[in-house]
């Protein structure tokens, strides 16, 4: 009996992209349901009534929400090409960096840099550079955060290999440069060049337009009329 695997996503969500990468790395076939978050489908609201967000994974009728939770479920369910190492300490380490990526790196770059201007933008850049220093130290001497193969932390931080370039382009600044972050820059290239990764990036021009619109809307709201 064929397995039912469905992924609810949007075209641009970096969180949903993690799920796509993980399933493809595992060789799992799945159906994709694209959502419009300005007009959420009844199914999405039924499957994820708490957060009402993507991604959502549906596996043989079972519903799993939140991208990092979904990655762990995928790794437990399909054992081939493991995302987590067997060693408990290394597993904990991978989970730590995945969470650090969401709680610190993503927050400081998206909300502290892309969505700010002036003095607040300068502060956001400093905070982002501080967070990136920790990643540089962690990846030094390694091909991937997972060692020789792409693992959980790589997938969680993978948005940096594509989305960050777009944010840098929009703002005319560089956060990860070869001089300050040689190991992180090398990892970005290595990760982005993996076929399963680069075959699934969203359209670059559409992302530029989306991020510019998001930035303008955010800053426009905060500008006194």
Image (cartoon, rainbow, N blue to C red):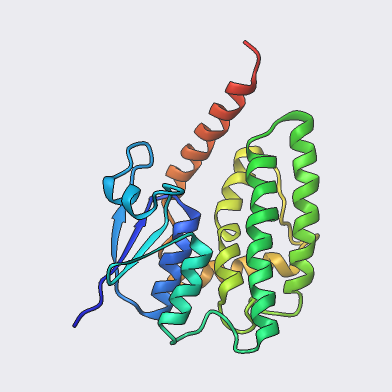
- Residue at x-position 68% and y-position 82%: 90
Which one is in front, 132 or 221? Answer: 221
Can residue 166 be seen here? The reply is: yes
Left or right, residue 117 beside residue 13: right
Q: Residue 57's spot in the image, x, y percent?
A: 37, 64
- Residue at x-position 60% and y-position 51%: 165
Q: Quadrant of residue 123?
A: top right
- Residue at x-position 70% and y-position 83%: 89
Q: Residue 93's spot in the image, x, y percent?
A: 69, 76
Q: Residue 167's spot in the image, x, y percent?
A: 60, 45
- Residue at x-position 38% and y-position 50%: 10
Q: Residue 102's spot in the image, x, y percent?
A: 63, 57
7, above or below 88, in the image: above
From the image, which quarter does the N terminus lie in?
A: bottom left
64, above or below 141, in the image: above
Q: Quadrant of residue 98?
A: bottom right
Left or right, residue 180 beside residue 74: right
From the image, which quarter does the C terminus lie in?
A: top right
């Amino acid at each position: 009996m064929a397995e039912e695997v469905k992924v609810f996503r949007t075209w641009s969500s970096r969180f949903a992209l993690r799920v796509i990468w993980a399933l493809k790395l595992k060789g799992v076939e799945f159906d994709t349901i694209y959502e419009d978050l300005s007009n959420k489908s009844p199914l999405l609201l039924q499957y994820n009534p708490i957060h009402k967000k993507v991604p959502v994974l549906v596996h043989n009728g079972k519903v799993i929400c939140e991208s990092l939770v979904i990655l762990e479920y995928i790794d437990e369910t399909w054992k081939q090409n493991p995302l987590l190492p067997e060693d408990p300490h290394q597993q904990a380490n991978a989970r730590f960096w995945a969470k650090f990526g969401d709680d610190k790196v993503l927050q400081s770059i998206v909300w502290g840099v892309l969505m700010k201007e002036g003095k607040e933008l300068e502060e956001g850049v400093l905070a982002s550079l501080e967070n990136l220093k920790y990643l540089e130290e962690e990846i030094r001497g390694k091909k991937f955060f997972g060692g020789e193969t792409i693992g959980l932390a790589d997938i969680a931080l993978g948005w940096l290999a594509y989305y960050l370039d777009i944010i840098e382009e929009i703002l005319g600044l560089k956060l990860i440069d070869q001089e300050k972050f040689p190991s992180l820059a090398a990892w970005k290239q290595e990760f982005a060049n993996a076929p399963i990764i680069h075959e699934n990036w969203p359209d670059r021009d559409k992302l530029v337009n989306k991020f510019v619109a998001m930035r303008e809307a955010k800053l426009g709201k905060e500008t006194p009329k």
